Image (spheres, rainbow, N blue to C red):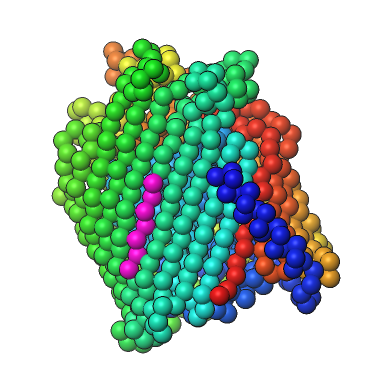
Amino acid sequence: MKRLLKILMFLFCSTLTSVAFTQPNYQRAFKDSVLSASSNVDTLTSKPDSVSQRTAQAIIPNKYPLFIPDEGNSFKISYNKVRMNDYRHSAQVLSLLPFTYFQDMGSFGQPGIMKVYGLSNSSVAYSINGIDQNNRWKNHLNTYYLSPEIFDTLEFVSLPSGFLYSRMNNPVHINVNSRNKFAKRSYSRLRFHQAPNEEGNIDLIFNAPLFSNSWIYIQVANSAAEPRGGQQTGGDYNTDFSLWNIQTSLNYLFDNSWVLEASYNHIKENIELNGGVERNSSMYEARNATVIYNALKQKTTAHNFSLNLNADIFKGARSFISTYYRFNEQEYRQNTDEGLLSESIPVIKNDNKYKSYGISGRQIFDYGFFNFDLLGNYERTDYNADLISNNTNEDVFSVGARLSLNLFEAIYPSFYAKTSNIRKVQYTGIGGEAKLKLTDSFLLSGELSFFESPFSLLEEQLMSAGTNVSKQKNTTLELNAELNSNELSARLGYFYYRNDNAALPVIDNYADTLTINEVGYFIPSELERSGINLSLSLNLWKILVTTNSAYYFDNSTNKNNSLPDFTSSSGVYYVDTLFQSNLYLKAGINFKLSGEKSFVTFDNEKSLPVAYSSNGISNNPALISTESVPLAKQFDLFLAGIIQEKATVYFVFENLLDEQYYLLPYYPMYPQGLRFGISWEFLD
């Protein structure tokens, strides 16, 4: 990885140097705006650059750009707005959305915890072009498997509406619309970054017409990191990471109203999971630190196929049909390596596989003053998983509908309902929304829903004996106010969420040791979350100020997943065009804050943060620790520039103040270091 990155860097720098400051001048307009619930306005991100505008001229307009209609209360952000922001993987792009927070684990590739509305894991659904990407037995997705370079539009469904579009009625739903595959000319793109500890990422895209009405799209991405040190294994910190993500598709355009796409996605991941670092005087010294697991690793293989047909049957009627197949295998190994066996660490050797076959259909009728959206899905999944006590299969069938009205171009009410049959149990949900457009720049919205959802297969299988609960009962509320002007864009939101029967993970027979962190069972428990969020973008002369900050109201159930009492991702930047408008510059400080949070440990195999344990005697689980993780802060020096409309170059000096603290027990903060990268788009 290191040698390849050096070669690419040399070639790019040579090319850029040869063309620098020789092209005609151009002017750039810059305006950051806050995420909009009613339009494609983006949040906390950079202006559309002329490279993207130039590329767009070579792209045939996408007739089906959005999964969630504008009439629905969703929030959208386009990739063109993201490219001048700092990100190393998709979780940092997702963190631009309201009420999002990524609980990092201090090493590139370590899975981390993506929290949305204070919820995580089986409460959050991710889809690409409407097809559910979550692992079927966990009902969860490692966000590293979402390549940010495939993003065309990122859609964040409001909390009350999330269940309507989710296969398993997850309250939170995030959909990725992939890049347009219909190029008038051959189009290529390369992005890479490199950081300390051999961390690097390369992402290559090629898109070209084959014949007059067919196109091919190929994307190959590789992310990798090497061990950082550690004394147990001769300098191996047990953080080795490699991820291949390959996307390819063939697209056929019958005419202006019929589009057929066949796509394939392959994921191959090998990762070492160290469980964190034992707390001692050497915990921040990579070479001398004592990692908790020196022989824990996981390999994941996925093959995903889909065939999609999008069509306009007649004016005002849009149809979508997708068939898909998904294969996933997770091989988990703990304390199985000869020569590294430890008597204090449990031996685990699990292979968890599944195959899913599905078909989803959708019909949208849009006549201006009303929009009717009808959705249906059927899926069959066959499991062969060591974690599932009786290997089984499951059927999921659902039908949902949404009616949205446009009254006087100022009032936008909508109503929706859904019924699902999952593992032969019926689940229902209803909801409604109202939006009031007071002026062209000021919008108010409110939404409320009540719905039932199933436990994940893992939760159902490990539910404590004697539990007579088959459904989770959810209540959600969200209120938003938005203001958009030339200098200021702001969005203030409030949410409330309650689940009467959430699945609470418990470590069984906990022996007061860091090396025992496997979830033994789940118990049903009340879960409640509420909070406010402010997304703001302010332009003053050549100074840009942004923030995406949330405060979560005190609630006893916050300790269940180590939710901080507040989070903030902000920045102050100088933005300008320099050198006779040949360089567009954005330079400043990124800073992140997260408040005090409760103590949890992390079950790597099940991807679960765990706060409670049982001693094997009492049925009343207790907190693993009454400790709390103190306030965490990070300041980064950030610089990005677009040179001659040909390349975006960026540098990040991470952890500027060399802060040392736990991000999550027992994962130390990234060490101070320099990260750099280049993104280059070109035609033909």
Q: In this rendering, does residue 560 appear at all? A: no
Q: How many marks?
A: 0
In the displayed structure, 128 sits above or below 103; it is below
Q: In this rendering, does residue 656 appear at all? A: yes
Please identify the quadrant where the C terminus is shown.
Answer: bottom right
Please identify the quadrant where the N terminus is shown.
Answer: top right
In the displayed structure, 257 sits above or below 402; it is below
Quadrant in the rendering for residue 272: top left
Nearer the observer, 421 or 471: 421
Residue 326 spot, x, y in % from top left: 28, 54
Q: Residue at x 69, y 41 (%)?
A: 674
Q: Residue at x 19, y 33 (%)?
A: 389
Q: Residue at x 80, y 69 (%)?
A: 21
Residue range corresponding to the magenta coloring: 262-268
Is residue 328 a member of the stretch shown in magenta? no
Q: In this image, 308 relative to 639: left or right?
A: left
Residue 107 spot, x, y in % from top left: 55, 35
In the displayed structure, 108 sits above or below 161; it is above
Quadrant in the rendering for residue 405: bottom left
Nearer the observer, 513 or 642: 642
Magenta segment's dominant SS is strand
Residue 11 spot, x, y in % from top left: 66, 58
Residue 108 spot, x, y in % from top left: 54, 39
Nearer the observer, 203 or 284: 203
Q: Residue at x 58, y 57 (%)?
A: 191
